[in-house]
Amino acid sequence: MKLIYGILIAAFAYASEKPEVSLTSQIRISQFVSLNLEDLILKPQPVPAELLDIPITLPDQGVTKAELLEWFKSKKETYRELNLFTFNFPEKIELEVNDSVTASFITNRIVNRLKVKCSDCEYQIKFSHLPKPTTMVEKIDFAQLPASGPFMLSTLNAKGEKSGWVTGQIQTSRNVVKANRFLRSGDRLRLDDLVLEKTDISFIKDYYTDVSQLVGKKTSRALSVKATLSSSDIERSHDIKQGQSVKARAGTSGFEVVIQAVALDSGSTGDIIRIRNINYQKMLTARVIEPGLVEIQ
C-alpha cells in the first residue's frame, strides 16, 4: 500500500511539473484557412514545438470549455504530445470569421516556428506576396523557412497540392554583446566594457548573447564603441601549446591505441595540428580533442 501511495505521489509531482499552456478566449480566422491548435494559444506565450500543426475544427458559433475538454480528451491518443502539457481553458472561445487569409494570421504561424529556434529573438515580417483572398489554405509548407532574410513558402490545399505562395522578408532582432567603449587589441575584457543591445542580426551569423562568456578574455583587434563582438574579435586560448607533451589516440571505440607525442603547433579544440611521435620521431597530423589529448587523422 505504501509503495502504491509513493508511486501516486511521484506521478502527481511529475504531472504538476508539466509546462502550462493558456488558450485564448477569442480568435479571428478565415473561412479559407484550416485551424491549428497553435492558433488558439494565448499570445505572447510561445508555442511549444510539439503543438505545431495539430489540426482542430471549431464551430462558427464558438466552443465552450466543456466542449474543449471533450476534444482534448478524444485526441490525446492520436496526438500524444497533448499529454506533455497542462492546458488552461477559457470558459468559451469565440470565433470571428473573415473572408480572406490575413497577413497577421500567416505572421503568427511564421513567428511561432521561428520562436521555437530562438525564443528571445524578435521578428518583423514584411510580405511581398500573399495567397489570393479566396484561395483555400489547408496548410503552409514551412520546410524552407529561413531564420531570417527572404523567404518563399508554398500553400497547400486539402489534396496536398500547391495552391499558392507566400513570399517576403524576415527581419530578426536579438540582444547581442557590443563594446561599451573603445577597446584596444589585447585588452582584457571587464564587465563594464560590454553591453547587451538589441540589434538586427538578419545578416550577422557570428555574435555573443552572454556577457559573462567574454569577461576575462582578451581582444584580438581594436574595436570601436558599439561594435558587435564576434569570435574573431576574441583572442583564442590554446588548449595545446607548441612543444607540449600530449596523448595521441587512434583507432575506433572497439580498438584504440594511445601514444605519447609532442605538439609541433599550438591549437584549440577542433583545430588540426602537427605532432611528432616520441618513439619514432615521425610527424603526424591530429585534431585537438581537449587539453592534452589529440586524435590522429
Image (cartoon, grey):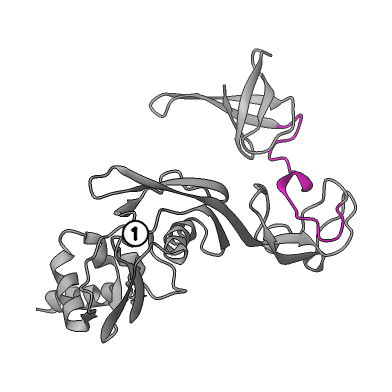
Can you see residue 238? Answer: yes
Amino acid type at image mark 1: Leu
Vertical placement of 92 versus 109: above or below? below
Q: Nearer the viewer, residue 144 or 268?
A: 144
Badge 1 marks a residue whose secondary structure is loop
Chief SS of the magenta region: loop
Q: Residue at x 66, y 13 (%)?
A: 282
Q: Position of residue 149 (x, y in %)?
A: 59, 49
Between 109 and 59, the one nearer to me in the picture: 59
Point out the image quarter for the N terminus.
bottom left
Residue 239: in magenta span: yes
Residue at 34 percent across and 57 percent down: it is 134
Residue 202 position within the rendered picture, expressed as x and y whole percent measured from the top left: 63, 52
Range of the magenta residues? Answer: 223-244
Choose between 226 and 172: the one closer to the eye.
172
- Image x and y of residue 27, in percent: 35, 75
Check disc 1 and report the residue beneath it: 52
Q: For this view, does 47 lie left or right of residue 32? A: right
Magenta run includes residue 225: yes
The residue sitting at 87% across, 63% down in the picture is: 181
Instruction: Determine whether 260 is above or below 120 in the image.
Output: above
* Image location of residue 51, percent across then percent down: 32, 62
